[in-house]
Amino acid sequence: MRTREEALAFALSFPDTYQDAPFRDDNWQLVRVKGSKKAFLWTYERNGYMNLNVKVDPEWRDYWRDAFASVVPGWHQNREHWNTIILDGSVPDDAVREMIAKSYRLVTDSPSKRIYEAVKKIPRGKVATYGQVAELAGDKKMARAVGNALHRNPDPEHIPCYRVVNAKGELAGAFAFGGANVQEQLLAADGIMVVDGRVDLETYGMKLPEN
């Protein structure tokens, strides 16, 4: 990959993306994500070569820099979170594409999205605690965020938030599901017994895989 056109075409192949030229200098062409308007690819010519700025996970940042001399700390951006790829022909096309793809995933990732995906993993006949859902979503510390996200559940038919209980196995308040006993009725339909507003976690609790 040596040209701006190739890089832009690949970035624009991802869902909900668009090209943007926000500055008066046409040398800067970006690809953003619709909705958030966050850019995950910056393209510009510098020192005779096309350059790409891509967002990078700090855990992978130094790996890419060490692997290729033409991958350097992000120029004109936060060097902790961005790398610059100099398209001088020394970085293989598949590596360039992988870095652009990872940048797209980082920009489009959201805690709520990960929480909803985690809830989908709770099997029928089991419940999970807010803490377990947070762990499945990649951050044990965001149990409170789990509750907030589930109250805004955009797709109750496919995101079974009624299968989430607190650390004692207690159900959510009546307001959470639109009325008293609604969560209990949904759990009963799954074959889960509720006694005095509580589920026995020893019997029905989901077991997370051990690391």
Image: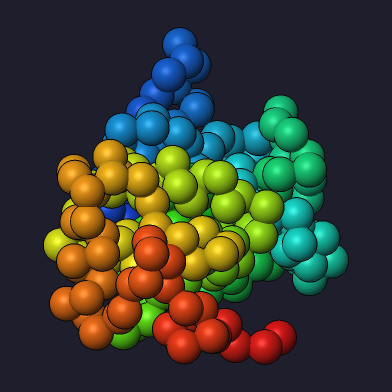
Q: What's the residue at 43%, 19% (across, down)?
A: 22
Compared to 86, does 200 lie above or below?
A: below
In this view of the protein, can residue 95 be seen by the observer?
A: yes
x and y, in percent, of residue 186 in the image? 20, 67
- The image's colour scheme reads rainbow
Q: What's the residue at 44%, 41% (across, down)?
A: 148
x and y, in percent, of residue 90 in the image? 68, 67
x and y, in percent, of residue 107 in the image? 49, 45
Compared to 199, does 61 lie above or below?
A: above
Q: What's the residue at 58%, 63% (across, down)?
A: 167
Of residues 199 and 110, the one nearer the viewer is 199
Of residues 103 and 133, the one nearer the viewer is 133
Compared to 30, does 125 lie above or below?
A: below
In this view of the protein, can residue 117 be seen by the observer?
A: no
Q: Quadrant of the C terminus?
A: bottom right
Of residues 5 and 130, the one nearer the viewer is 130
x and y, in percent, of residue 85 in the image? 65, 52
